[in-house]
Image (spheres, rainbow, N blue to C red):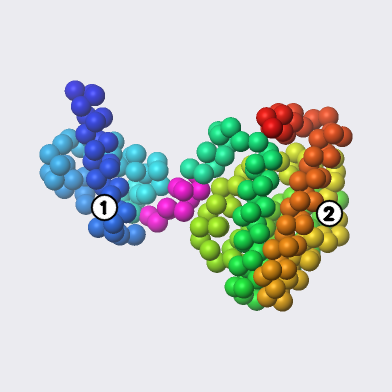
């Protein structure tokens, strides 16, 4: 009986999931009550709860006390988590990661130069100012460095690029943090970042691409050099040795 209940709950989960994707149940709507779903599918309340719990874990619905089960628009974060897991668990080298980063960030900068609002440019300026201010505090520097590039992703106004970049951030943060903390190496004057910002501010999409490529190649070289000097980068070294 337990095996049958699990099989039924998966079937119902898939049906409810399909209804969410095709907008039968739209964002912010409440699902039918558990009793209504029990009656529709001819199953027990436990089976319905199993199906709903699985959907909640995947980020498609949430339980609201006293209200019911609400549909939420969490598709981007679900996709981002899936990509994160693929990157973290896959047999990929650091070289492959940096090549992909360069490709993604080039396109982010290209579209940001075409689409960035004045408010988004202001945020990029703030990130650079904070990087310069905290050049002696590597932990904070890394935070604002990554924030700068995330703001470029947002300024690109391309939701898929933003989602992919969000997926890359945990691995990128880990690599940058380990290298910077171990070597104390930062771009104190933010030369690369300022050149990228200047191109975005001027609407120079090709220039933004070029300066981003220069930045990313410089970063990759810095990481390779850091590995030769640092003594506590076991995680990074292991990743490079897969090449």
Q: Is residue 139 among the parts visible in the rendering?
A: no
45 relative position to 175: left or right: left
Give the SS element for disc 1: helix
Asked where in the image residue 48 lies, by quadrant, the reply is top left
81 relative position to 107: left or right: left
Residue at x 83%, y 61% (from the top left corner): 191
Rendered position, 234 above or below 218: above
Could you say which is closer to the camera, residue 142 or residue 164? Answer: 164
**Residue 206 colored in magenta in the image:** no
Residue beneath disc 2: 187
- The picture places residue 70, in percent across and down from the top left corner, at 32, 53
Rendered position, 179 above or below 20: above
Could you say which is closer to the camera, residue 35 or residue 139? Answer: 139
Residue at x 65%, y 57% (from the top left corner): 105
Q: Which of marks 1 and 2 is nearer the N terminus?
A: 1
59 relative position to 155: left or right: left
- The picture places residue 141, in percent across and down from the top left corner, at 77, 52
68 relative position to 176: left or right: left
Residue at x 85%, y 43% (from the top left corner): 184
Asked if the residue under mark 2 is in contact with the one under mark 1, i.e. CB atoms within 8 Å, the reply is no
Bin the neighbour count of mark 1 within 10 Å (Cα to Cα): few under 14, some 14-19, many 20 and up: few
Give the SS element for disc 2: loop
Numbered range of the magenta stretch: 72-81
- The picture places residue 162, in percent across and down from the top left corner, at 55, 57
Residue beneath disc 1: 19
Rendered position, 181 above or below 142: above
**Residue 79 colored in magenta in the image:** yes
């Amino acid at each position: 009986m337990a095996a049958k209940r699990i099989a039924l709950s998966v079937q119902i989960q898939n049906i409810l999931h399909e209804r969410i994707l095709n907008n039968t149940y739209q964002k912010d709507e409440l699902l039918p009550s558990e009793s209504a779903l029990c009656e529709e599918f001819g199953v027990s309340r436990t089976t319905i709860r199993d199906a709903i719990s699985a959907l909640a874990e995947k980020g498609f619905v949430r339980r609201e006390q006293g209200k019911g089960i609400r549909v939420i628009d969490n598709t981007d974060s679900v996709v981002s988590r899936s990509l994160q897991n693929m990157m973290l668990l896959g047999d990929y080298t650091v070289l492959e990661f940096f090549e992909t980063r360069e490709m993604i960030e080039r396109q982010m900068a290209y579209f940001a130069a075409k689409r960035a609002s004045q408010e988004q440019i202001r945020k990029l300026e703030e990130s650079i100012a904070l990087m310069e201010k905290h050049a002696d505090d590597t932990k904070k520097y890394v935070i604002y460095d990554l924030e700068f590039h995330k703001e470029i992703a947002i300024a690109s106004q391309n939701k898929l690029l933003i989602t992919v970049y969000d997926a890359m951030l945990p691995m990128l943060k880990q690599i940058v943090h380990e290298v910077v903390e171990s070597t104390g190496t930062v771009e104190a004057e933010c030369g690369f970042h300022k050149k990228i910002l200047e191109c975005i501010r001027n609407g120079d999409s090709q220039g933004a691409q070029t300066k981003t490529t220069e930045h990313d190649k410089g970063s990759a070289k810095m990481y390779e050099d850091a590995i030769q000097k640092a003594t506590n980068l076991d995680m990074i070294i292991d990743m490079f040795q897969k090449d």
